[in-house]
């Protein structure tokens, strides 16, 4: 039987959306006649990104709980009830053979209903410190795919599968495509390209750093492809007037951006780190200090400790950034060493391993 039906749910940020899309793409390769439905939060970026990837999506009226007492928190019980009822209807109408959750608010109600109906279910946790949704679902789902060791302190050990994080297939094919990447962004071929990534929504401190160093980058003879995030685009778009700077709210051709890059500056979210290991370019990590258990710093440190990336904490940027960057741009051997070392950490078969687990569930 190959006309299976799969529901995938995850969103809020690219770190939850793109793993779900990667899993769906691999399932589609194995089961070309399968039907797919995504479920997300109705006001978040998955409502745009999932249809762009060629899949249908249904939205739930759901959001997270704020840490302080707000009107949004008072609305949460109503949103949760509405989302549970909507999830019930979606599952009743679609009749999935398996449900996959990749984290984010919407996957909570959807997986809650799926597990209550004994539908085979799997969650994928990208981080070394799990999100609240996946922690709550852990006791109910059949399988938990993780990217880091040591997560039995959060999840039932017998359900854990160490797979790595699913990565978009196009990133596996960027080797030897630097010319094509530079042409995609109209970049000069004889000048190094710096790719700046602050995550899908943007990163304030990273953007401030880049803006403060535009003249420095010019002096270093570097061209920038700068993804500042949609929240910050209006504040920085005027720098497109500079001949060595391109400011983008979001990069839709991520594979070509990675291919074009000679050096990358990035946050250290789990999916970003996994992607950058696959991409194998010299990277400066600037982890966000504003995340649970400071897990971005842990992600970045795990790579930097293997001499596979440069780690600069936000509090050290003013003192260290220019020296670290100048050393990297001037030393080709150092860049090559970082490239080779980060590539050695890549788990290239993660998506296949996760889909193997989905197959085990539907074949039971």
Image (tube, rainbow, N blue to C red):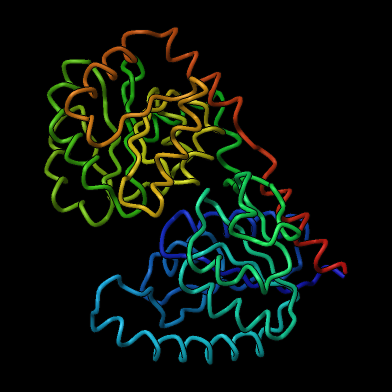
Estimate the x, y position of residue 52 in percent, counting from the top left.
48, 61
Estimate the x, y position of residue 18 in percent, counting from the top left.
52, 55
Quadrant of the rendered image containing residue 44: bottom left
Relative to 73, does residue 300 appear above or below in the rendering? above
Residue name at image x 60 percent, y 71 percent: 137
Q: Where the C terminus falls, by quadrant?
A: bottom right
Residue name at image x 52 percent, y 66 percent: 10
Q: In the image, 242: left or right of 76?
A: left
Q: How many marks?
A: 0
Residue name at image x 39 percent, y 65 percent: 45
Q: Where the N terminus falls, by quadrant?
A: bottom right
Name the outermost residue toward the front. Answer: 153
Relative to 299, does residue 355 appear above or below in the rendering? below
Q: In the image, 218: left or right of 84?
A: left
Q: In the image, 252: left or right of 308?
A: left
Quadrant of the rendered image containing residue 32: bottom right
Relative to the observer, which residue lies in front, 149 or 217?
Answer: 149
Relative to 345, does residue 230 appear above or below in the rendering? below
Relative to 352, does residue 27 appear above or below in the rendering? below
Estimate the x, y position of residue 85 in percent, counting from the top left.
53, 92
Residue name at image x 43 percent, y 46 percent: 295
Q: In the image, 182: left or right of 176?
A: left
Relative to the observer, which residue lies in front, 134 or 93?
Answer: 134
Estimate the x, y position of residue 312 in percent, counting from the top left.
31, 29
Relative to the observer, which residue lies in front, 124 or 184?
Answer: 124
């Amino acid at each position: 039987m190959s006309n299976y039906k799969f529901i995938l749910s995850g969103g809020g940020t690219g770190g939850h959306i793109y793993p779900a899309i990667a899993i769906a793409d691999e399932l589609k390769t194995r089961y070309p006649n399968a039907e797919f439905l995504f479920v997300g939060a109705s006001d978040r970026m998955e409502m745009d990104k999932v249809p762009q990837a060629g899949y249908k999506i249904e939205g739930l009226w759901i959001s997270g709980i704020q840490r302080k007492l707000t009107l949004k928190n008072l609305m949460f019980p109503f949103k949760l009830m509405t989302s549970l009822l909507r999830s019930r209807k979606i599952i009743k109408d679609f009749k999935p053979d398996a449900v996959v959750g990749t984290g984010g608010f919407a996957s909570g109600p959807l997986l809650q209903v799926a597990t209550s109906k004994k539908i085979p279910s799997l969650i994928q946790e990208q981080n070394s410190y799990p999100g609240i949704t996946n922690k709550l679902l852990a006791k109910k789902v059949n399988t938990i795919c993780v990217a880091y060791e040591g997560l039995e302190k959060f999840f039932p050990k017998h359900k854990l599968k160490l797979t790595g994080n699913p990565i978009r297939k196009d990133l596996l094919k960027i080797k030897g495509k630097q010319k094509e990447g530079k042409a995609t962004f109209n970049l000069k071929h004889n000048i190094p390209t710096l790719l700046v990534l602050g995550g899908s929504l943007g990163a304030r401190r990273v953007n401030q750093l880049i803006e403060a160093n535009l003249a420095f980058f010019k002096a270093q003879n570097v061209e920038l492809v700068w993804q500042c995030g949609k929240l910050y685009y209006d504040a920085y778009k005027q720098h497109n007037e500079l001949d060595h700077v391109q400011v983008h709210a979001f990069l839709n051709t991520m594979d070509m951006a990675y291919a074009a890059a000679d050096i990358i500056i990035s946050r250290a979210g789990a999916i970003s780190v996994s992607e950058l290991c696959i991409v194998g370019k010299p990277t400066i990590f600037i982890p966000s200090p504003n995340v649970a258990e400071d897990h971005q710093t842990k992600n970045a440190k795990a790579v930097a400790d293997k001499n596979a990336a440069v780690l600069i904490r936000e509090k050290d940027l003013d003192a260290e950034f220019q020296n670290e960057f100048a050393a990297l741009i001037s030393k080709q051997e150092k860049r090559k060493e970082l490239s080779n070392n980060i590539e050695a950490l890549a788990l290239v078969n993660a998506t296949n391993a996760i889909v193997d687990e989905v197959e085990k569930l539907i074949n039971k």
